[in-house]
Amino acid sequence: MKKKIVIGLWISLVILVIAFCSLVVYQNKQEQILMETQEKLEEAQLKLDQKAEEAAQARKEQEALEAQVAEDIDYTFTDFKASYFAKKDATVRENPYDSAEVVGTLSIDTPVEIKAKCDQSDYYKIKVNGDDGYISFDDVSEEYVEIPLPTSSKKSVPSSKKDILFIGNSITMYPATKDWWGSGWGCGATAPENDYVHRTVAAKGYSSFDFMSLRSWEFSNTRNNELDDLDPYITKHQYGTIVIELGENVKGHETHFKEDLTDMIKYIHTYNPNAKIVMLDNFWPYSNIIKTKKAVASETGSTYVSLSDIQGVSSYQLQEGQQYTAPDGTVYTINSFLAGHPNDQGFEAIANKLIAAL
C-alpha cells in the first residue's frame, strides 16, 4: 500500500515538473514573440519618423523655394484707396506674400486704411504705425464684422429693484490715482457729494442707486464685447432709470459708434425692459458724436439731456496748472489729463440739467 502511494506521488511530481517546464517554455516563447513584435513596432515607428522628417524637410525646402521665388518677384501696385475692417487675427506681413515675415496682427474690426492693391498677389498695401505693411484680401472686410450681444440663457430678467443706474466714463466715476484726490467718484469733483451723480441722487431723493465706469467701451473696436461689464448691474437689479454718460472718449474711435450705442441700449433692455433710458449730452462739444447720440436717442425712444449751453465753457472746467489742496493737506496741480474735466461748478450744472429731465 505504501509503495503504491509513493509511486503515485512520484508520478504526480513528474507531471508537475513536466507542466512547469512546459509553462516555462511557453512563457519564453511568448516573451520572444513580444520582443520580436516590439522590435518590429520600433522599426516601423523609426521608418514613420524618418518619412515624417523627410516630408517636413521637403516642405521646408518647398517653402524656402516659394519664398525665394516670391522675393525675386518685382512687385508692383495699383492705387486703391479704401477704408476696410480687419477680421479676427488679421495678419500684417512685411511683404505681399504668404511666406513673408509677420510684423503684427490686427484685432477684429480694427479700421484698415488701404493704400494700394498688389498686381502679383492677393495682398493690399496698408499703412501701419507710419510704415507700409501688407494684408491678405481674406483678412479684411468692407463692412465691420458684426459682434453678437453677450446674451446667455443663464442670465434672466432680475426681480430686485433699484431706482437708478449711472453708466459713464471718468466724469461718472474714476478710480484712485496719484494724479488726483478722488477715489471712485466723478473725476474733478472735490468730493463725492459734489459730482453730478451724487447731486442728482440727493436732489431726487433716490434711496437706491449704482454708478459704474464703462470707459473701456468708448475706446474699443469691439464694443459689444465690453457689454457684459454691465451684467453685475442689469442682470441683478431692475432699474427704474438708467443714465448713459458716454461719448467724450469716442473722438478718434467713431467707427460704427451709432450701431454700438444702439446695441448697448438693446442689451440693457434685454434685462431691464422697462427702464427709462436717459442719454446725457457730451460735456465736451464734439459735434459729430453729439449728432450721433441724438439720433440714437431719437430712434430708441430715449430721453436726451442737452448740455449745449455749458459745453466748452472754461468756468465749468478744471484748468491746467490750477492747484487743489485736499483735506489731508496734499496739494495737487491740475495736469493735462485732469484739465477740461468738470469742476464743482461744472458738475452742478450737469446735475441741474439732468435733474430737470428726470
Image: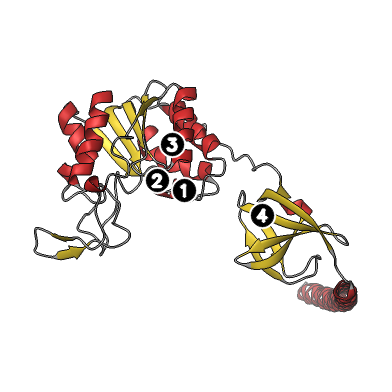
Picture layout, residue 315 above or below residue 236: below
Picture layout, residue 337 above or below residue 239: below
Q: Which residue is mark 2?
A: 248
Q: CA distance from mark 1 to mark 2?
A: 7 Å
Residue 357: x and y in percent read 28, 24
Verify CB contact (< 8 Å) between mark 4 and mark 3. Answer: no
**Can you tell which quarter of the image residue 67 is in?**
bottom right
Q: Which residue is mark 4?
A: 113
> Circle 2: is it few (<14), some (14-19), or many (20+) Cα within 10 Å?
many
Instruction: Tell us which disc is closer to us: 2 or 3.
Output: 3
Q: CA distance from mark 2 to mark 4?
A: 24 Å
Which one is earlier in the sequence, the residue at label 2 or at label 4?
A: 4
Mark 4 is on which residue type? Glu
Q: CA distance from mark 3 to mark 1?
A: 11 Å
Residue 92: x and y in percent read 69, 63
Verify CB contact (< 8 Å) between mark 1 and mark 2. Answer: yes
State the quadrant of the C terminus.
top left
Mark 2 is on which residue type? Glu
Q: CA distance from mark 1 to mark 4?
A: 18 Å
Q: Which residue is mark 1?
A: 251
Picture layout, residue 295 above or below residue 3: above
Q: Is residue 195 visible?
A: no
Q: CA distance from mark 4 to mark 3?
A: 25 Å
Q: Nearer the viewer, residue 155 or 354?
A: 354
Mark 3 is on which residue type? Ile
Image mark for residue 290: 3
Which one is earlier in the sequence, the residue at label 1 or at label 4?
A: 4
> Circle 1: is it few (<14), some (14-19), or many (20+) Cα within 10 Å?
few
State the quadrant of the N terminus.
bottom right
